[in-house]
Amino acid sequence: MKSASRRRSYGVEGAPYAHPSPTTALKGALRAPYFFLVPAVVLFLLFFALPIGYAVWLSFRKVKVSGLGLGSGARTEVWAGLENYTDALSDSELLDGALRVLGYGCIVVPVMLGLALLFALMLDSEKVRLAPFTRLAIFLPYAVPGVVAALLWGFLYLPDVSPFYFVLEKLGLPQPDLLDGGPLYLALSNIAVWGGTGFNMIVIYTALQAVPAEVYEAAKLDGATPLQIALKIKIPMVAPSLVLTFFFSIIATLQVFSEPTTLKPLTNSVSTTWSPLMKVYQDAFGKGDIHAAAAQATLIALATLVLSFGFLRAANRRNRQDARQGAAR
Amino acid sequence: MSSLALHQADPAAGTSPGTARGPARPRRIALVPTLTLLLGAVYCLLPVVWVVIASTKSGRELFSTFTFWPGTGFTGNVSELSSYRDGVYWQWMGNSALYAGLGALLSTCVSAFSGYALAIYRFRGRETMFNILLAGVLMPPVILAIPQYLLLAKADLTDSYLSVLLPQILSPYGVYLARIYAAAAVPADVVEAGRMDGAGEWRIFTRVALPMMLPGLVTVFLFQFVAIWNNFLLPYIMLSDDEKFPITLGLHTLLEQGANTPALYTLVITGAFLAVFPLVALFLVVQRFWSLDLLSGAVKS
């Protein structure tokens, strides 16, 4: 292909390099990537770098009120040092919210990824029927906005309209209140699991598809059962995509906001500060204390980075250990 | 549960071509994987089926008839929803289509430019730039959205269409996908040949590389369309005028008003059904010529 087009250019133009000299072409090629990247870089500076810097700056400031706080000069912004951070770390509402979200995450992430892996392995197994239909059906919730998902499940949790309560009532079984106490965690987790399983399943399934069939052939000839192949070959082969889905699930879980916000009107058990992000929103726009909110947001971002990268490092270290053990064997 | 399922799958898998002895039984179905997937499908479709049926019920039927028995009030519900506050619901739908359609289009362009540059050219700072852009994925939206709001307030842009549109144009995941697709779909030889023919870099990009990247860019567009359509936090923070609300925010306010008045339940349910419909339809249509696998960055070798 390369030589053909080169020859054509020689033939048509007569002399080689008749047109733009190679040096100008080279200069164009040297400068081009930077031009192509201008929109992304400008948007990144305006809508990522600048806001983050501004949030961090705000988190070290506070509003000082002099006198009665009336008049234009009464409220001045001053340097606060770490005061907003110490306030945030001793704020029981924020800590309670963090604990709630940790508990919620401990349900959501393992269940969602376990189901995603299970479905991906089933899709990848031989002689499975209806795979295209079930794959699409399980993926479908991805196209449903979190707010609408919370709303749909919210109605399914309401005794007046829910089919579950109808069935429980007919069977004479106890009818628990799903929107209160412990069941509330399950109710909220279920919404996240429902919405996220499909996308993660696709990611894992794609990785499984990329494994060449020969890898399984030898194991099959040795009489390995599908379960053994799944546990000993398939899961280790897709470990990188499992690590990736875990990583993104942790990040998404710590930032839960729209689902509890949507369920809030249906129950008194979801407070305005149920998750840390809701607390940040409440402080910034409910109380109007943007400095406290900025410090809390920065802390949440740091916690997210520490947890997600801590997980990545741990996963990498294990991989390396496994590799070393494999080499030793 | 998974181990149980796989164990029971053994007999069926034993008939696979590699190990089968005796008469071939190619029509055997792996029962347990199929059933597991069907259960998953039922779980995932259940709320959608419920909302489809519930939206056909009139307010009275909703509380009196069996949940999965269709009612007779669908057209009544839709017209009631349409007349709710002079058709503000359809305004929300239009807004969502505008935010998601235009936003995804711009986002796809920006991703295509950057992905192409990062995949094709060798230049100083390439990997650093890529990593910094990618780090944007890790930023919690709220640490971005609140200062974005405060900064846009200084530019007098909050509570405007632009305040929801602009922050969502740059998508780190879109750039990441576009880079993978460009690297896989555009051979360096072709770019080189274009240069030899005397084409400028821009011309090579638009005439040669862009058509090759198109299937991947469809994916970036879809991903970003869904992300913007489903976004709640950003418009929740940016907007106060409900004429500019997207559908997610509109439904949220509808539910807030309707939670204490069961008479409004049917409106919320019908509204939720109509809000799910466009995206589900989009995915069903797109299925014909686009594969789900592309979403995770899979490229055919």
Image: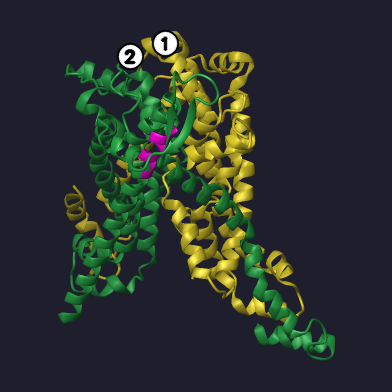
Chain colours: A green, B yellow
Q: Which percent across, then down, holds residue B211?
A: 66, 63
Instruction: Check disc 1 and give the amino acid type.
Output: Pro
Q: Is residue B103 above or below residue B21?
A: above
State which quadrant residue A15 falls in: bottom right
Asked whether disc 1 touches disc 2, contact meaning CB atoms under 8 Å apart, the reply is yes
Q: Magenta span has A181?
A: no
Q: Which residues are magenta?
A: A290-298
Q: Can residue B214 be seen by looking at this rendering?
A: no
Q: Residues within 10 Å of mark 2 (few under 14, many from 20)?
A: some
Quadrant location, the N terminus of chain A? bottom right
Query: In the image, is B3 to the left or to the right of A197?
Result: left
Give the alpha-carbon distance from disc 1 to disc 2, as whole Å. 10 Å
Subunit of label 1:
B
Image coords of residue A256 (percent x, y): 36, 37
Residue indicated by mark 2: A160
Query: What chain does badge 2 belong to?
Result: A
Residue B69's place in the image compared with A52, above or below, is above
Position of residue A137 relative to residue A179, above or below, is below
Q: Secondary structure beneath disc 1?
A: helix
B73 or B143: which is nearer to us? B143
Q: Residue furthest bottom?
A: A15
Asked if the stretch drawn in magenta spans residue A293, the answer is yes
- Disc ID at residue A244: none
Whole-percent x, y for residue A227 in the image? 20, 59
- In the image, taking residue A70 as reference, residue B259 lies left or right, namely left
Q: Name the amino acid type tagged 2.
A: Asp
Q: What secondary structure is the stretch in magenta mostly built from?
A: helix
- A98 or B188: which is nearer to us? A98
Task: Categorize mark 1 by other alpha carbons within 10 Å: few (<14), some (14-19), many (20+).
Answer: some
User: In the image, which is nearer the foreground, mark 1 or mark 2?
Assistant: 1
Residue beneath disc 1: B262
